[in-house]
Image (cartoon, grey):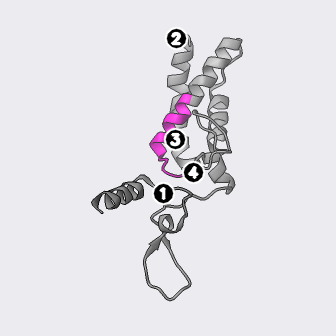
Amino acid sequence: MSPAAQQLFMQQIAPILIAAVPRVVVPVGAEDADELVQDALVAACEAVHRLEKRGQQIIPRSVAYYTIQRLQSGRRSTGGGRTDVLSPGCQLDGNASISSLDEPVHASDEENDDLALGDVLAARKDDPSQIAARNLKSRRM
């Protein structure tokens, strides 16, 4: 990026993004406003670089506008895929919900055991701790 484009970016595009992103972009998951601002700055910097490389005019308000649109749609500087359940785009679409394995499961039976989601998921194989415990028992006998 040329020094002129850097000046344009720092003086006109960055202030718009720093002011607007925390107000208009909804954080998803563990994101916070500062992280979204940094992501917006990266995406806008990449856009300015691409425009300059193609020899196109850099319009600061347009770069900021389309960067904000990109963030609002769930696309981030690291990617915009919607197939990963942890991606902001997938979560914004409502196609996925993330639950903790420590989340309590309310069983309909009379037992009052506090079961967590991780306790009721079946595994096809024994986990290493079960194998080790079995090996210890067989050696003691």
Q: Residue at x 68, y 44 (%)?
A: 82
Circle nearer the viewer, 2 or 4: 4
Q: CA distance from mark 3 to mark 2?
A: 25 Å
Q: Are marks 4 and 3 in contact (CB under 8 Å)?
A: no
Q: Label 3 amino acid? A: Leu
Magenta span main SS: helix
Q: Position of residue 124 (x, y in %)?
A: 56, 57
The residue that label 1 is drawn on is 126
Q: Which circle's residue, 3 or 1, is located before the other in the chain? A: 3
Q: Which circle's residue, 3 or 2, is located before the other in the chain? A: 2
Taking the image as shown, residue 88 lies to the left or right of residue 14, namely right
Circle nearer the viewer, 1 or 4: 1
Is disc 3 placed on a helix, strand or loop? helix
Q: Are marks 3 and 2 in contact (CB under 8 Å)?
A: no
Q: Label 2 amino acid? A: Pro
Residue 21's quadrant in the figure?
A: top right
Q: Which circle's residue, 2 or 4, is located before the other in the chain? A: 2
Q: Position of residue 104 (x, y in %)?
A: 47, 72
**Which region of the structure is painted magenta?**
29-42
Q: CA distance from mark 1 to mark 4?
A: 41 Å
Q: Which circle's residue, 1 or 4, is located before the other in the chain? A: 4
Q: CA distance from mark 3 to mark 1?
A: 41 Å
Pointer 3: residues within 10 angstroms few (<14), some, or many (20+)? many
Residue 26 image label: 4
Front one among 141 and 127: 141
Pointer 2: residues within 10 angstroms few (<14), some, or many (20+)? few
